[in-house]
Image (tube, rainbow, N blue to C red):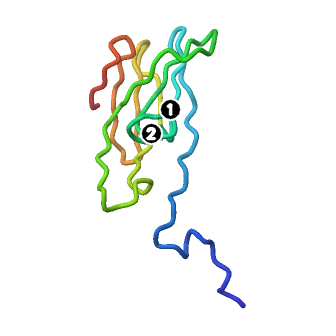
Amino acid sequence: MIGEEQDDEMMSPAAKRVGPEDVPSVTLGRTRFEVIHWGRERGLGQSGGYIAAFDAATNKERWTLKVYDLAYDPDLEEDVQDVFIEGLAPRGEDKLAVLDERGRRYIVDPRQRSVRPE
């Protein structure tokens, strides 16, 4: 019947959220930076908000950095509370600009492995 076929996501009030869009990597000098989505699958404390630094020549991961904290409400499903990074861009010659899904902006200093709000 018309109208009976609906996407399962639309029908379920507890539907899982759609995954985040891929974010292009950024290379500064000899280091390539990538966004880590689904950090919990890697044993990290939350799913969104992480970046990883790789040696651009060898592709070996050097380190990860949490850009921002997420506070999970235990009464809600975690996946609907995840906030992912949606933008990564060079800022000058040695810093990264990070944009999350809520429009918050951060500046990452890879040398110091530090983060500050923009």
Quarter that holds the N terminus: bottom right
Residue 4 quadrant: bottom right
Residue indicated by mark 2: 85
Mark 2, secondary structure of its residue: strand
Q: Residue at x 42, y 57 (%)?
A: 80
Q: In the image, residue 49 lies at what x, y percent? A: 40, 37
Residue 108 quadrant: top left
Q: Residue at x 46, y 73 (%)?
A: 13
Chain-order first, disc 1 or disc 2 = 1
Residue 75 quadrant: bottom left
Residue indicated by mark 1: 35
Q: In the image, residue 35 lies at what x, y percent? A: 50, 32
Mark 1, secondary structure of its residue: strand
- Are the residues tagged 1 and 2 within 8 Å (C-beta)? yes
Nearer-the-camera pick, 55 or 105? 55
Q: Residue at x 63, y 10 (%)?
A: 58
